Image (tube, rainbow, N blue to C red):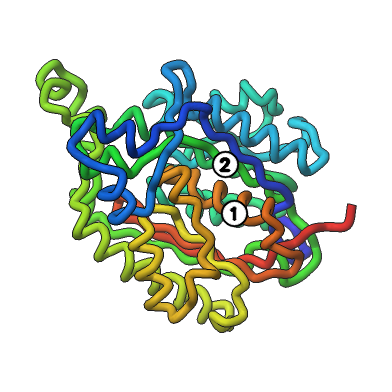
């Protein structure tokens, strides 16, 4: 155990998205929809689609490699790997184990997956933070990697228009400097509403059969109206609670980085918090909902654009299947090289 109070901060971010872009115009030739219909209801214009041989571990490895390189480190410097995904390469072993091998990480480090759907990245951040503050791990990779194109029903216009593929990685590091990095976290779940967003078959309760494949039970199904209602309420409440926990006012937060699910959800959450949308960066138009990858994708984009500065307070918040949710307040920290 460490006798020194440790802070955990994001030292570097890396992302990867597939080359193929699927536009709304192309989707309108596949299902009964239109560019206007999709944009009006979701804010999405296009999304990235992974190829047949491009798995979450492949995308995650590319994103993680960029984060390691940006930090000026090597794979040997990583002490812990956590992958957040709802679309693992296979049921087992974990996608993290595949990613470990592809990155060439050491074989004496823990590697495991976190399954919290779109809240996965926020969940994984807290798990990593708690493990690192014990003093046992100096540096960790938290990766969100998804291939949602493999679980959507491309004949269902209410869901297939929303999702895309991609990966984002954060390289975390400990420091003895106080009041930096991940300041406060809040996680929650409500399994009583699991049926609102779920996949009915494919697990041990309903293994794959010819009938389940024929009936499309391996595809993602969602009650959009109810998910919207729960998402807005819980995301706003999570932000308020974590701010109160950290004794921070909303006006002190430079940027709110929400899970990129739907522009209407983002607007409703911003309205409930009485925060302008100019402080809610969004890349929904280009990527759609990439589940656990969406927050690191949005965070990296804001950093690349020069919006995020050293010392900025940033609040990330997510909501996903489970139902799950989480929020993390962090102070952006760029250590002296």
Q: Nearer the viewer, residue 169 or 163?
A: 163
Q: CA distance from mark 1 to mark 2?
A: 9 Å
Residue 189 image-quadrant placement = bottom left
Residue under numbered circle 2 = 168
Residue 134 visible, this angle: no
Q: Residue at x 21, y 44 (%)?
A: 158
Tell me residue 243's x, y (percent): 53, 77
Secondary structure under tag 2 reads strand
Tell me residue 284's x, y (percent): 44, 50
Badges 1 and 2: C-beta atoms under 8 Å apart? yes
Q: Residue at x 28, y 55 (%)?
A: 41
287 in relation to 328, above or below: above
Residue 318 visible, this angle: yes
Secondary structure under tag 1 reads helix
The label number, if any, that marks residue 146 in the structure image: none
Residue under numbered circle 1 = 299
5 in relation to 60, above or below: below
Q: Is residue 12 left or right of residue 293?
A: right
């Amino acid at each position: 155990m460490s006798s020194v109070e440790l802070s955990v901060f994001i030292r570097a971010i890396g992302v990867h998205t597939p080359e193929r872009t699927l536009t709304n115009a192309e989707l309108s030739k596949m299902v009964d929809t239109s560019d206007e219909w999709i944009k009006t209801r979701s804010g999405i214009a296009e999304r990235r689609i992974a190829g047949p041989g491009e798995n979450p571990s492949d995308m995650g490895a590319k994103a993680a490699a960029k984060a390691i390189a940006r930090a000026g480190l090597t794979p040997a410097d990583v002490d812990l790997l956590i992958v957040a995904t709802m679309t693992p390469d296979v049921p087992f072993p974990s996608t993290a184990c595949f990613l470990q091998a592809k990155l060439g990480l050491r074989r004496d480090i823990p590697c495991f997956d976190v399954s919290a759907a779109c809240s996965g990245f926020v969940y994984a951040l807290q798990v990593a933070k708690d493990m690192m503050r014990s003093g046992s791990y100096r540096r960790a990779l938290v990766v969100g990697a998804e291939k949602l194109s493999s679980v959507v029903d491309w004949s269902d216009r209410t869901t297939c228009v929303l999702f895309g593929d991609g990966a984002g990685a954060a390289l975390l590091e400990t420091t003895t400097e106080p009041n930096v990095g991940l300041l406060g976290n809040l996680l929650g779940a409500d399994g009583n509403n699991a049926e609102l967003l779920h996949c009915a078959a494919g697990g041990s309760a309903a293994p794959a059969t010819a009938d389940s494949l024929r009936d499309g039970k391996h595809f993602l199904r969602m009650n959009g109206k109810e998910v919207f209602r729960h998402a807005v309420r819980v995301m706003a409440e999570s932000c308020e609670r974590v701010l109160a926990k950290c004794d921070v006012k909303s006006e002190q937060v430079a940027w709110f980085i929400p899970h990129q699910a739907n522009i209407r959800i983002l607007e409703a959450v911003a309205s409930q918090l009485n925060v302008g949308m100019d402080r809610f960066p969004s890349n929904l138009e280009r990527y759609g909902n990439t589940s656990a990858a969406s927050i690191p994708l949005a965070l990296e984009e804001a950093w690349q654009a020069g919006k995020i500065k050293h010392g900025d307070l940033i609040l990330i918040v997510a909501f996903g299947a489970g139902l799950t949710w989480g929020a993390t307040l962090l102070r952006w920290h760029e250590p002296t090289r």
